[in-house]
Amino acid sequence: MALLSVTDLSVFIGRLKPLDGISFDIGKGEIVGMVGESGSGKSLTAMSVMGLLPLIGGKMTSGSIRFDGIDLATLPEPHYRALRGRRIALISQNPMTSLDPIIRIGAQIDQVSILHLGLSDAAARARSIDIMQQLRIPEAATVHGNYPHQLSGGMKQRVVIAMALAADPELMIADEPTTALDVTIQAQIIQIVVDLVRERGLSLLLITHDMGVVAQACDKVVVLYAGRVAETNGIDAIFGEPQHPYTRELIRCIPRHDQLRGSLTGIPGAVPSVMDYPSGCRFHPRCADALDICAGAIPALEQKAAGFAACHAAINAAGKVSAHG
Amino acid sequence: MIKSSSLRTILLSPRGGISAIVLLAVMICAVFAPLIAPYAYDIQSLRDANLNPSWKNWMGTDEFGRDLLSRMIYGARTSLSVALTAISISVAIGMSLGATAAYFGGAFDRLVTAVVDLTWSFPEILIALILIAIIGPGLNSTMIAISIAYLAQFTRLTRVQIMALKNETYVEATRSLGAGHAHIILRHLLPNALTPVIVAGMLATGDAIILEATLGFFGLGAQPPTPSWGAMMSSGTAQIFIAPWIIIFPGLAIAITVIAINLFGDAVIDVLDIRRQLRDS
Amino acid sequence: MADEAQAQLPSDNLVAVRDLTREYKSSGGLFSTVRSMRAVNEVSLDVPRGKVTGVVGESGCGKSTLARLVLRLIAPTAGRVMFNDTDLASLAPAQLRKLRRSMQMVFQDPYSAIDPRYTIRRALLEPFEVQGVALGKGEQEDRLLALISKVGLSPRMTESYPHQLSGGQKQRVGIARALALSPSFLVLDEPTASLDVSIQAQIIGLLEALKQELGLTYLFISHDLSLVRYFCDRIVVMYLGRVVEILPGARAEACHHYARTLMDSHFVPDPRHRKAVTPLVGEIPSPFNLPPGCAFAERCPAASPLCRRERPLLSEHATGHLVACHHPA
């Protein structure tokens, strides 16, 4: 059974509907990548699962979010608070704003296990240093006593990850955890997080726009486009046999060094804004495979091969196009 | 600077609409004073001194028997023209100083900042009084004194705006096209800094009307027989128990005009969403 | 290195950079002394005519400062930039301003690269105004439409304001503005870094087509190695203000250990090619306090005592392939 199961999630912010019928599952011990371009709803999905929508004036209007059998959509806030940070942890995009600049690093990590696990100060400190060492923070005991401004960006992000791990969560949600970092640091952190998650059997929702990171780290992928799920499938199928034309084109947009000059063309048009989504399939104005029906009818997310795709053309067509072809 | 859609929003709001009507009325009085005023402002008739308001003299007469309504209407002309001219001069000089200081930086910037910080710590009235003590009383002196008193405010506000704007990519992009300093300051920086400075100027006009009236009250502004609201109030103090309308009507005029300016300014600030920019300075 | 590079025929290189250095001083504060750092440190490189030269490196490596130095948007502390065999430092301000017609820049952030108060029409005509090119009414319209269509925008957009356009459209306007004066050389400073993947590919495609059509020479600054390897003919790798390696072609194998780490850190979008990332040890040294030897030595798997003592010079490893490393792989 899935640890987290999101079904038909729709969210309104004012009169806008930035999430429209999102469905996906995360199994125990699974690393699921969530990819999409700006405005696709990746971060909003994370906020919905964390129960943080009220902070930005968002409202869940339909669907359910079930975590280990608990219906999060109807969970009262006090219960949610006991869950948030304890069983579901969030690693946010910007390590600079996730840490309190005037509190020592160590105290910030300790606090999590004192609060959620009821550890004593000494036990919490030992636990924090242990986690910091697992995250390959050099001289963890010294860093424990440092202030955030004394650390580099990469180190700060490791501290944020240590805070997420301190309460021993079952599900971690990482929202673009390495976007603000340099490539060499990004590679290091992705590697460490993936190793730790696998070792501890945690589940991870990895939100990113980087298909390279997804290919490197994930078991499953959810592709979002303009507030809807375009496709969800296993990692090999997503890259080997993408069902949705958007997935296929998105992979083609990534330059490869062995690629022929001039073959990089991108997807025509622009990512639509939530204020003015096209009718029918929201990708149809940019889609090379679009049929007449695509402009009129919203394609349902239907079982296709091992995964699900929301595409009229993919459901109709017998032959599929491979990204590697 | 203000889009027509924003202007419509401002004028259709109760605050903005009512204050705009009041300001328009005051401005019409000021501009068309000779056409509107029932009498000349300087015809004395000691026989008719301190008359009660009546159908003949709607606001009564003053201690020299001059029609108070006519003097009020001409007074609007004095108050508004002094305040507006002074603030316009102040805004123009302040923007030039603030923009050049922020853009070029260096010693000039440090000098401007030091002078601005120094004058910032004195009340405007004190600065104006000191200046008038030096250059002597009169309408022109009042104008000069008021414009210098408010100079620090506009210099500072412009400087803060330009400091933020000069690091925008479009400034560098324009420089990379081969544009000189004048082009960058006049075509990009100042137009983008203009809105908050103009709004601050509008609000300061209200304060300047009070400052002008205060100076007039002390006899340092418009010299008789030129009517000014402040000077009229001053002469009214002597008759306060026999003819209180002489002090009440100019006082009301000042209050209503200044309140209207502030309300209108507030409406503009809210619609353009620039409260933060004004506070930052 | 400088000698070798100069031995090439001058006409091959549209731009030649020699020992370019830019120093910044931190103002210190009340109780600390003034410290200085070199954002760009004795950089020499050539930009061959009609080719794309890529400069790649991480934040703080000096690539953006280099871009601005090459166009003399900022003045170097030392060193020279030769454009078409003219030393930019020798030009009077008016001459330099005129030369700007030939060398232009496309900026990283299209969102702030256009004055928010300017319509697209005004933004695209500004280059002519700035350069004192008088255009008749009809001529203005012709140039405007030609530019707009060259970058794939619709003529309907001329009266739009920047906030009405998407990021990709804004970057197209940025490119059109750079092309307005018919330059021969463009510095592209991470032109796609703030765009979505599908839009990035569009813009790269457009830049490629424009280069073919107009015979342009590019200096392409980026942190994205796969993009640089796809797009560029030569690759310059920078680390902490210095050039550590110049690769003659996109397929060339890197020899400098930092360049190799950089390439290793890139994840290929193919789950069949997962890799184990070798952990990096050591911290990046502070640019205010660089070690006497190789700046990468603390993090380098192949570092020897020599590396910590003596800074390796950029020298020819193979034809056109320069490396600054005592122990190249």
Image (tube, rainbow, N blue to C red):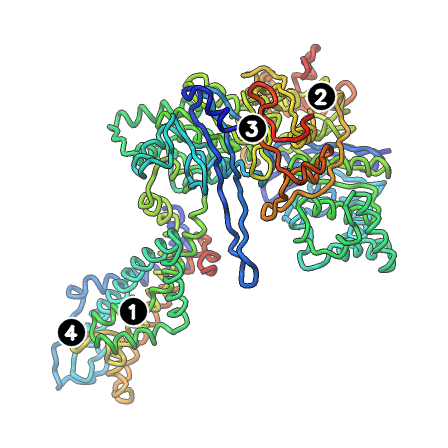
Q: Are marks 4 and 3 in contact (CB under 8 Å)?
A: no
Q: Nearer the viewer, mark 2 or mark 4?
A: 2
Mark identifier at residue A239: 2
Marks 3 and 2 share the same chain: no
Label 3 – label 1 distance at C-alpha: 61 Å
Q: Mark 3 points at which residue?
A: C236
Mark identifier at residue B41: 4
Give the percent coordinates (x, y) of residue A194: 78, 35
Give the percent coordinates (x, y) of residue C259: 64, 30
Q: Name the residue under label 1.
A: B146
Q: Which chain carries label 2?
A: A
Label 3 – label 2 distance at C-alpha: 31 Å
Query: Residue flagged by tag 4: what amino acid is it?
Result: Tyr
Marks 4 and 1 share the same chain: yes
Which residue sits at x=38%, y=34%? Answer: C88
Query: Residue flagged by tag 3: what amino acid is it?
Result: Val
Does residue A77 appear left or right of residue B271 in this picture? right
Q: Residue furthest top?
A: A319
Q: Of residues A14 and B185, which is closer to you in this image?
A: B185
Which residue sits at x=62%, y=37%? Answer: C311
Which residue sits at x=47%, y=40%? Answer: C112
Q: Nearer the viewer, mark 3 or mark 1?
A: 3
Q: Of residues B69 and B56, which is closer to you in this image?
A: B69
Label 2 – label 1 distance at C-alpha: 72 Å
**Number of other residues with Cα within 10 Å of mark 1, as a class: few under 14, some 14 to 19, many 20 or more:** many
Query: Residue flagged by tag 2: what amino acid is it?
Result: Phe
- Image quarter for residue B218? bottom left
Q: Nearer the viewer, mark 4 or mark 1?
A: 1
Residue C223 appears in the figure: no
N-term mark: 4 or 1: 4
**Number of other residues with Cα within 10 Å of mark 4, as a class: few under 14, some 14 to 19, many 20 or more:** many
